[in-house]
Image (tube, rainbow, N blue to C red):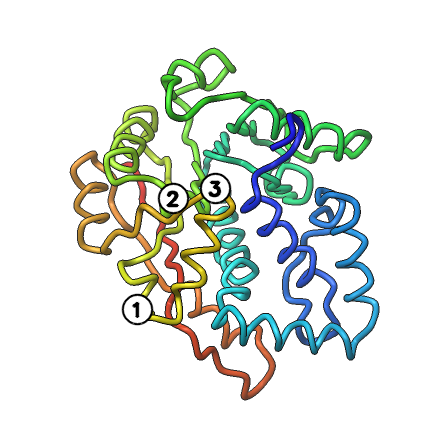
């Protein structure tokens, strides 16, 4: 991997956000004007070409659905679910936003709700450098923004955040998107413990996760598991809803919402177009009382 490059999964997530941001109606149900900008230039240009041609865009949409058994729709749908949960948290008084593994997330630039909040983006230093180069000259809407380089396997998360100016006494919303599935259970449990210990009353954690069997799928997921391994990010952290809720409760976090990402499809998908794949991902919101 080149020194200034995001992970393959970060690129894939941004590519799907870019694709569905300006798809011909009614498929353009995501609003992320910076997703294409954050992509490596050839891929960003490709998404623009597809979006500009309605017939091609619909073909790509259908082809991706077939090949991935609707996994391609999980990212844009979870974007809607997370944006909604973030909006509720900020309206509820959160004044800090922590991204645990920020990747190519653009919420600090596009979410107006963050105008009075401090944003802390935690990720590998090379990913930050790549992102800084891509977003140079673009106005951030957040009141304060900090790139926080971190090695999640070696660094102490609480120490890194405090050094970056994080205030553990201020209500915070933390986002952990598309990460749990790649982590061993011990790492997931440990991160929940640290997030809970750093969260003031009124704080919340938003995260996505995948149940065993990739949400209920069987043999058709073999190629997806192999693909994840080939790009260097093998699936290691499928977890049951019951176990995950138990870990959250153990550390004083109460689950307020837990729903399949696919549940957002009827709100935005074309009439009569049903999801045929499993519930690839779920998104939960847990709060610190």
Quarter occupied by residue 112: top right
From the image, which quarter does the C terminus lie in? top left
Tell me whether circle 3 and circle 1 mark residues in contact (CB < 8 Å): no
Q: Kindly report the distance in space between the C-alpha atoms of the residues bearing marks 3 and 1.
A: 24 Å
Q: Closer to the N terminus: mark 2 or mark 3? A: 2
Mark 2 neighbour density, 10 Å: few (under 14) some (14–19) many (20 or more): some
Q: Which mark is residue 182?
A: 2
The tally of labels here is 3
Question: Which residue is found at the position 54% from the left and 76% from the top?
Answer: 66
Q: Kindly report the distance in space between the C-alpha atoms of the residues bearing marks 2 and 1.
A: 17 Å
Question: Which residue is found at the position 31% from the left and 46% from the top?
Answer: 237
Rendered view: 14 above or below 16: above
Name the residue tied to disc 1: 216
Left or right of 110 on screen, residue 86: left
**x, y percentage for residue 270?**
60, 81
Question: Which residue is found at the position 30% from the left and 26% from the top?
Answer: 194
Left or right of 129 on screen, residue 257: left
Name the residue tied to disc 3: 232
Question: Which residue is found at the position 23% from the left and 35% from the top?
Answer: 186
Q: Tag 2's secondary structure? A: helix
Mark 1 neighbour density, 10 Å: few (under 14) some (14–19) many (20 or more): few
**x, y percentage for residue 251?**
20, 34
**x, y percentage for residue 188?**
29, 37
Q: Which of 250 and 171 is in front in this view?
A: 250
Q: Closer to the N terminus: mark 3 or mark 1? A: 1
Q: Tag 1's secondary structure? A: loop
Mark 3 neighbour density, 10 Å: few (under 14) some (14–19) many (20 or more): few
Q: Residue furthest top?
A: 163
Q: Tag 3's secondary structure? A: loop
């Amino acid at each position: 991997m080149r020194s200034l490059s995001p992970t393959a999964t970060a690129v894939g997530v941004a590519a799907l956000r870019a694709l569905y941001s300006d798809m011909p109606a009614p498929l353009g149900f995501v609003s992320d004007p910076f997703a294409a900008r954050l992509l490596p230039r050839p891929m960003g240009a490709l998404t623009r070409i597809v979006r500009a041609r309605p017939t091609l865009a619909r073909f790509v949409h259908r082809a991706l659905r077939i090949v991935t058994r609707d996994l391609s729709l999980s990212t844009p749908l979870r974007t809607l679910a997370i944006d909604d949960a973030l909006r509720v948290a900020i309206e509820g008084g959160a004044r800090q936003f922590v991204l645990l593994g920020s990747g190519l997330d653009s919420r600090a630039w596009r979410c107006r709700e963050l105008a009075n909040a401090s944003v802390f983006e935690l990720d590998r230093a090379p990913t930050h450098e790549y992102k800084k180069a891509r977003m140079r000259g673009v106005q951030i809407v957040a009141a304060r923004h900090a790139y926080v380089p971190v090695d999640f396997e070696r660094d102490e998360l609480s120490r890194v955040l405090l050094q970056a100016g994080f205030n553990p006494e201020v209500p915070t919303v933390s986002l952990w998107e598309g990460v749990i599935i790649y982590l061993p259970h011990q790492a997931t449990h440990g991160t929940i413990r640290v997030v809970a210990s750093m969260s003031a009353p009124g704080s919340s954690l938003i995260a996505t996760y995948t149940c065993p069997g990739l949400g209920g799928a069987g043999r058709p997921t073999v190629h997806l598991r192999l693909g994840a391994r080939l790009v260097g990010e093998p699936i290691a952290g499928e977890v049951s809803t019951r176990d995950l809720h138990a870990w959250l409760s153990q550390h004083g976090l109460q689950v307020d919402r837990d729903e399949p990402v696919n549940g957002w499809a009827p709100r935005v998908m074309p009439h009569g177009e049903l999801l045929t794949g499993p519930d690839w991902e779920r998104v939960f919101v847990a709060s610190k009382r």
